[in-house]
Image (tube, grey):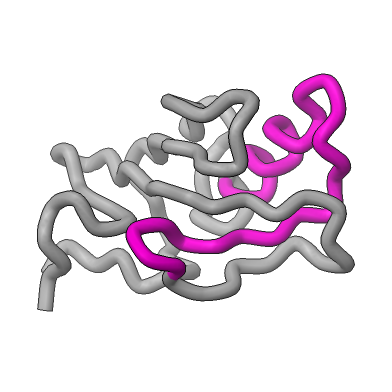
């Protein structure tokens, strides 16, 4: 069943918009689980000078099978809650199906 708009993801045409809760300085880069209206992601990078954001976007690009240029941070540059847009994802590492 498709989640209602306003859950942790929504589709805009072929773009997937994700609401993520990011935990930096983790042991591994990994998708954890749904956490309220965000999906929790752990990354190894520390939250310094945008390093965590860069690392997160590279991890997402790899995970969704797209180029780095197809992943954009939309909101939450300096927050743990981040909105990310992924253009035409080719793989689905997390259950964000089109319904």
Find residue 68 and report its horizontal and vertical position in percent: 60, 33
Quadrant in which residue 31 is drawn: bottom right
Numbered range of the magenta stretch:
35-60
Quadrant in which residue 26 is drawn: bottom right
Q: Residue at image x 70%, y 54%?
A: 23
In the current view of this chain or complex, which residue is farthest to the top? Answer: 49
Front residue of this view, candidates 78 and 55 = 78
Q: Residue at image x 36%, y 36%?
A: 87
Quadrant the C terminus occupies:
bottom left
Quadrant in which residue 51 is drawn: top right
Q: Residue at image x 60%, y 33%?
A: 79
Quadrant the N terminus occupies:
bottom left
In the rendered structure, the answer to whether residue 1 lies left or right of residue 58 reads: left
- In the image, residue 75 sits, relative to residue 36, either above or below, namely above
In the rendered structure, the answer to whether residue 21 lies left or right of residue 50 reads: left
Image label count: 0
- In the image, residue 89 sits, relative to residue 82, either above or below, namely below
Q: Is residue 50 magenta?
A: yes
- In the image, residue 43 sits, relative to residue 61, either above or below, namely below
Front residue of this view, candidates 65 and 32 = 32
Q: Residue at image x 81%, y 36%?
A: 47
In the rendered structure, the answer to whether residue 27 lies left or right of residue 3 reads: right
Front residue of this view, candidates 46 and 36 = 36
In the rendered structure, the answer to whether residue 59 lies left or right of residue 15 reads: right
Find residue 35 and report its horizontal and vertical position in percent: 45, 68
In the current view of this chain or complex, which residue is farthest to the bottom? Answer: 1
Find residue 20 and report its horizontal and vertical position in percent: 49, 50
């Amino acid at each position: 069943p498709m989640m209602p708009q306003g859950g942790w993801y929504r589709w805009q045409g072929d773009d997937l918009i994700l609401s993520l809760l990011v935990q930096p300085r983790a042991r591994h880069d990994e998708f954890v689980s749904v956490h309220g209206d965000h999906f929790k992601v752990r990354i190894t990078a520390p939250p310094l000078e945008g390093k965590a954001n860069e690392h997160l976007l590279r991890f997402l690009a790899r995970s969704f099978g797209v180029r780095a240029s197809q992943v954009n941070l939309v909101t939450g540059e300096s927050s743990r809650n981040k909105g990310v847009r992924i253009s035409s994802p080719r793989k689905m590492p997390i259950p964000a199906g089109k319904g």
